[in-house]
Image: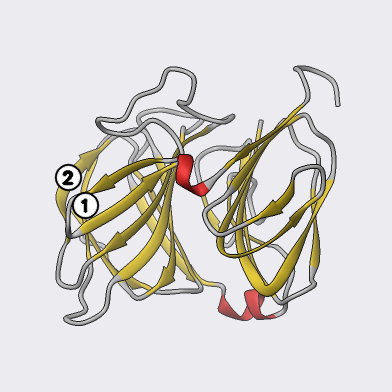
Amino acid sequence: MAGGATSIDVRRAGERFHTDLGWLDSWHSFSFGGHYDPTNTHHGLLLVHNDDVVAPETGFPPHFHRDMEIVTWVLDGELEHGDTLGNRGVIRPGVAQRMSAGAGIRHSEMNPSAALAVHFVQMWVVPDTEGLEPSYEQVDVEADLERGGLVAVASGRPGHGAVTINQRDATLFAGRLVAGTTVVVADAPHVHVFVAVGGGEFEGAGPLAQGDAVRLTAAGSRTFTAGPDGAEVLLWETA
């Protein structure tokens, strides 16, 4: 693929920035909040990739965002969303959610359970147009996940993902893979592959465990094969 140096950059789970606030246990793939490394601020258009566990009956009270496409994927438990547009929703595993902050929006994200923690991954990409009207969308993709392979859950290409983001050069895929399943990671300028659950073998990078990631830059098509316990993966393709 033309343009840019080819690289396969493996990032291990324990190398991520870590925030522990008691009610929140968060692992950051990129610089976030008080954690800053000028050499680790993004990969392609992906700016934030937080792996969060929130304790029962706690969460993020109303706070402000602007000009950001925010996609949230729940791995275990439930997360309740509310915002200044009047949107309300509870997302759980198998539901794709995005919030386009646009010109500005306040929202909250709370764990409604009195007993169980919620585990989710939240990801931010920059929009291709600033100052848009803020908006919200969630879609159940459980049936698509059960069919296996990679499912396009969020995309800026019309009709390509379950939910639509305002970034034409970004697509998020999710896959719940049974043991031994192999999926093809397509060629793209920037690809970020995150093992959210389980583990497997990535072509050109070797074994990956839960929380590990691979950042590909103009690396061509690759394969990932789920390990003996299966795997759940989140994969961003961006320009």
Q: Is residue 213 left or right of residue 91?
A: right
N-term-proximal mark, 1 vs 2: 2
Image quadrant in which the C terminus is located:
top right
- The spot of residue 134 in percent (x, y) is 32, 44
User: Left or right: 172 with respect to 105?
Assistant: right
Residue 68 coordinates in the image, percent (x, y): 38, 37
* Mark 1 and mark 2 residues within 8 Å of each other at the beta carbon: yes
Q: Which residue is mark 2?
A: 63
Q: Which mark is residue 107?
A: 1
Which residue occupies the foreground of this view, 15 or 220? Answer: 15
**Kind of element beneath mark 2:** strand
Point 79% across, 17% down: residue? 3
Identity of the residue drawn at 35% across and 30% down: 131
Near-viewer residue (207 or 55): 207
Above-or-below relation of 22 to 113? above
Specify the quadrant that holds the N terminus: top right
Q: Amino acid at mark 1?
A: His
Q: Quadrant of residue 101?
A: top left
Question: Residue 26 at what x, y percent from top left?
Answer: 32, 51
**Residue sitting at 52 percent across and 54 percent down?**
211
